[in-house]
Amino acid sequence: MSHDEALIKMLEAKAKSLRKIVIDMMKISGQGWLGGSFSMAEIIASLLFHHMRHNPKDPMWPCRDRLILSKAHCCEIYYAALGEAGYFSREYFSSYGRFGGLLQAHSQRTVPGVDYSGGSLGMGLSFAVGEALAARIGLSTDLSGGPTPKYRVYCIIGDGECDEGQIWEAAMSASHFKLDNLIVILDRNMYQSTGPVCEVMNIEPLADKWRSFGWVIQEVDGHNIGQILDALDFSIQVKEKPSIIIANTVKGKGIPSLEGRVHFITITDEIYREAMEHLK
């Protein structure tokens, strides 16, 4: 399946724009999880600005697709996309990480457009399984008498997060309940807070592990918009199995001196200048 070149270029430009917003947010706050935010810029752009069904003017629209950011500390790029989409005024970007501000340092449901408050890693996929089950509960009406909403649930997890045992309990449950309305995107940037994933806790063979749990696997270049869109389109055609897209990404993508190794960082003037130079 191919996508229009104009669409791909629009989403590439959007991903770059989101990175600029993130670096500005972090400059004001002084710090942030730059590595994991930048690694999923193209994924977030593809979901929020093309693939998902949602309405920024009606954040609680019952039929909206849900996006669960399980790696909730990397909320900066998510906030940037929500603000750009129109869920809240861009003026709130400056509130990131500030006491009493709207945009706190882990995603939370007080932010319009956010469906999951995260903190401890490993829990978001379980929440996503519950959301996906709710959409398939089988009743024709909800408690208010209205039609039971139908939607898809997207969940972004990290490769370091797969250290958590709860990830695998949730994976097993999703397969057992044949949740074909659940699509996971695994941001495989190969690095976690204390070092390379392969050294902290080797999770290979990653694809085989998910396949053995009954999931449909796709593997893409997580910075290639065309591949991401193709994989998302394929995933919604899958029947009676949950899907996972393993997106191979680069931590800190977009700032050459930081790529592949940066996690949480203090934003110095030098880093800010380098980022803006490469994000022109």
Image: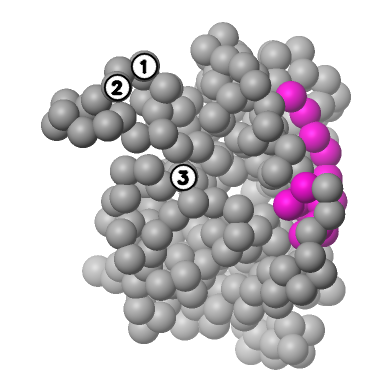
Of circles 3 and 1, the one toward us is 1
Q: Amino acid at mark 3?
A: Asp
Instruction: Please name the residue that numbered disc 1 is placed on.
Output: 138
Question: 13 or 38: which is nearer to us?
Answer: 13
Q: Please give left or right for residue 39 compared with residue 90 in the image.
A: right
What is the magenta range?
216-230
Q: Please give left or right for residue 83 compared with residue 188 in the image.
A: left
C-alpha distance separating marks 3 and 2: 19 Å
Q: Going 79% across and 65% down the picture, which residue do you hit? A: 4
Disc nearer the start of the sequence (3/2): 3
Q: Going 68% across and 27% down the picture, which residue do you hit? A: 238
Using a 10 Å C-alpha cutoff, classify the residue at mark 1 as few (fewer than 14 neighbours), some (14 to 19) or many (20 or more): few
Question: 30 or 50: which is nearer to us?
Answer: 50
Asked if the residues shown at circle 3 and circle 2 are in contact, with their CB atoms under 8 angstroms apart, the answer is no
Using a 10 Å C-alpha cutoff, classify the residue at mark 3 as few (fewer than 14 neighbours), some (14 to 19) or many (20 or more): some
Residue 278's label in the rendered image is: none
Asked if the residues shown at circle 2 and circle 1 are in contact, with their CB atoms under 8 angstroms apart, the answer is no
In the structure shown, which secondary structural element does the residue marked by tag 2 occupy? loop
Residue 262 in view in this figure: no
The relative height of residue 157 versus residue 126 in the rendered view (above or below) is: below
In the structure shown, which secondary structural element does the residue marked by tag 1 occupy? loop
Q: Going 28% across and 56% down the picture, which residue do you hit? A: 110
Residue 80 in view in this figure: yes
Could you say where residue 241 lies in the image, as x and y percent from the top left? Answer: 64, 19
Instruction: Please name the residue that numbered disc 3 is placed on.
Output: 65
Residue 140's label in the rendered image is: 2
Q: Amino acid at mark 1?
A: Gly
Using a 10 Å C-alpha cutoff, classify the residue at mark 2 as few (fewer than 14 neighbours), some (14 to 19) or many (20 or more): few
